[in-house]
Amino acid sequence: MELFKKEIRVLDGAAELFDLPADLVAGLPHIEVVGSTHFYMERHKGILSYSGEEIDINGEGCIIRIYGEKLELMSMTGDQLRIKGTISRVEWVK
């Protein structure tokens, strides 16, 4: 646990030094939800399951689960994805 705390302090220091967001330096997923119709994610590790009502995304150590209706994958690259539909809920699953 102590090692983990030291890693966080180093990452926070590097982010501050280079004036970068801490999540970017740590390689954490970046998520944006626009209203209830659009979902954007950077630094994903792939889609685990997909349907029009539920999408599970690998978020490196967690699963991001999106619930809704008429969910549709609009685009996906190696580290970014975009989903549209009527989003009712987004969960962070450990």
Image (cartoon, rainbow, N blue to C red):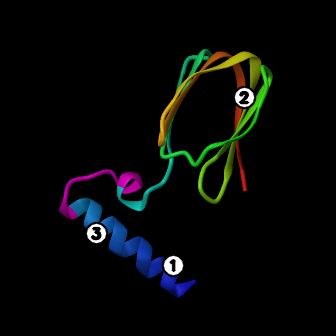
Q: What element carries label 2?
A: strand
Residue that numbered label 1 is attached to: 4
Between the residue at mark 3 and the residue at mark 1, the CA separation in whole angstroms equals 14 Å
Residue flagged by tag 3: what amino acid is it?
Answer: Gly
State which tag comes first along the sequence, 3 or 1. Answer: 1
Instruction: Tell me if 27 is positioned left or right of 83 in this view.
Output: left
Q: Residues within 10 Å of mark 3 (few under 14, many from 20)?
A: some
- Residues shaded magenta: 17-24
In space, the residues marked 3 and 2 are separated at their CA atoms by: 34 Å
Give the percent coordinates (x, y) of residue 22. Answer: 36, 56
Q: Cβ–Cβ below 8 Å for labels 3 and 2?
A: no
Residue under numbered circle 2: 89
Residue 73 percent location from the top left of the image: 62, 23
Q: What element carries label 1?
A: helix
The residue depicted at 43 percent of the width and 71 percent of the height is 8
Amino acid type, mark 2: Arg
- Residue 36 part of the magenta-drawn span: no
First along the sequence among labels 2 and 1: 1
Query: Considering the image in quadrants, where does the N terminus appear?
Result: bottom right
Quarter of the C terminus within the rendering: bottom right
* Quarter of image, res 52: top right
Residue under label 3? 13
Above-or-below relation of 32 to 42: above
